[in-house]
Amino acid sequence: MGRYIFRRLISLIPVLLGVSIIVFFLVRLIPGSALQMYLGTQVEATPEQMEELRRIFGEDRPVPVLYVEWLGRLLQGDLGYSLRTGREVLPDILQRLPLSMELTFYALFLSLIIGIPLGILSALKHDPATDVAIRITGLLGLSLPQFWLASLMVIAFSGFRGWIPMGNYIGFLKSPLENLRMLFLPSLAIGIGLAAVIMRYTRNSMLEVMQMDYIRTAQAKGLAKRVVIVRHALRNAILPVITVAGFNTGYLLGGAIVIEEVFALPGMGRLALYAIYQRDYSLIQGIVLIIATMFVLVNLITDLIYAAVDPRIRLDTKEG
Amino acid sequence: MSRLLKNPIALVGLIIILLYVLITAVSQFWLPFDPLQMDVAHIMEPPSFKTGHLFGTDEFGRDILTRIMKGAGVSLLIAISATLIGATIGTFMGVWAGFLGGAWDHWIMRLADVLFSFPSLLLAIFVMAILGEKTYNVIIAISIVYIPQFARVSRGAVLAIKNNEFVRAAFSSGADRRFVLSRHLLPNIMMPVIVQSSLSLSVAILLESALSFLGLGVQPPNPSWGNMLSGARKVMLLAPWTALYPGLAIMGLVLGFNLLGDGLRDILDPRLRNIK
């Protein structure tokens, strides 16, 4: 397992390098240089000051050189300075990151504890009517605009104090219970669609596994139905569900970004929107880079969990 | 086509989509009210047959049904164009990579891997931030999200059939690459690409509405379902209908594409029929 993890970590390097290249060069496609945008907010500069600024903004050097310099600073944890406030970008991002991550994983947790049990229960009933009902529920889950559901929740629960976080966000460390209660509806709005999808996958996977010979053997041995389902069927049926859940964290993260806007939560999404409205490109660059890195790591963790549950994966060294 | 009509899931999806297309067509010639004209005397009126505002009016007194009808065309136009562009470029790259193999395959797929490292919505937001908030930029942003997805699907399909006997037979009977590509490979990868397109259309509607909701997509006063929901946020506690109907409109169309895509997948792969 150790070697497998190491090999996967190494394989991340080219991907993250590619991400940094795309983020760096795309931002440079924006018409108008960063220096012009910075000067737009400042008073006139003297020729000497202009010379100095041009050097700081790197306009005297070719772009590939700037990329290497930027990458060097990046590896030291320096994401640069905001074009608007002049503050360091990284601390501001790190301050907002935990809330968005909490929303994402809270939503993932809710979608799993709703989706998997319902999927197992529905797998016990295998008839055409249930088949169609579960299938349509799963598709409805895919079709639900998360921010719309969130808006409806705000309307429906506006009378319940403490459940709708409107401008009075309380951090997890300050009061875990209040925090979890406050983020329950936002996380549910993000995750309920995925719950429906997970339910459908769990059910399909269970039905498939239940047809296997070893399940029939277990049943023929006279094992209790519960034991057969939990010990024998579920363990194998859960594999594709893990993959579906893991690869949908990007969808949840995207959902979190939009939902923060609905519930006025101070996370990465609101910071990103602020940065875009303010045309603060160094901040945007930092946010995109951090979120993409998190996403790549989450996908890696999904793969590792999958490998831990299913030892056969590790034998497959070619496609690892 | 006849198989499509026999699959109830796909059929219902197709009917829903055609209904939206019909609404879009009608809205080009006739709308119940003016979608942009503000009317301060009738702001936030609840839905009613008497006033003719079946879905009520918004915070500027504009008829919500009218704006939803007008928004249908915008959403369909963006979703269809973005999917078409993404599918064309992505499929071209995927077929190229799968067919030629070697270094082309390696670099095209590495590029796809990198693009896959961004969550879809984040990538779309990032591209919008760079290009600026214009309707045609929404199309570009969503198609960029789709290119790697189609590249992966079509490459997989090409690899799956590239070494089949009928392809090798074609080569050994003297057919050139272009002939094999157009006569044997393309027809066989069309089905997975079509299924992917249907699912992509549904996601495109959601992406567009999310971008417009965040103020990065279609700009007011032009109606789109997403920016209607954004406008509703200020008044939805007083006038819930401003938030209810645009969202239902989004969900209906997205569900239509999802039903069609899911049904098409059945038709494509009969083995799935037993377990769905």
Image (cartoon, coloured by chain):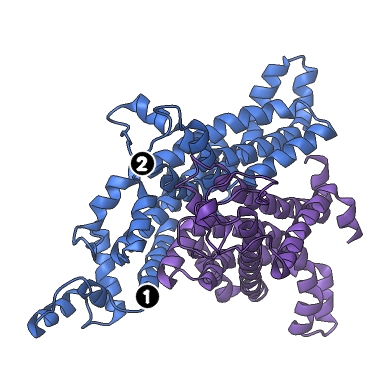
- Establish if B9 lies above or below A82: above
Q: Is residue B210 left or right of residue B76?
A: left
Q: Is residue B139 above or below residue A200?
A: below
Residue drawn 43% across the image and 30% down it:
A163
The colour of chain A is blue
- Hey, what amino acid is under mark 1? Ile
Residue type highlighted by circle 2: Leu
* Position of residue B146 measured from the top left corner of the image (x, y, whole percent): 58, 64
Circle 2 marks a residue in which chain?
A
Which residue is the extreme one toward the front?
B41
Residue holding disc 2: A99
**In the image, what residue occupies the spot 68% across and 38% down?**
A200
Indicate whether A234 appears above or below A27: above
Q: Is residue B102 left or right of residue A286?
A: right
Query: Which residue corresponds to mark 1?
Result: A30
Label 2 element class: helix
Q: Position of residue B244 (x, y in %)?
A: 59, 44
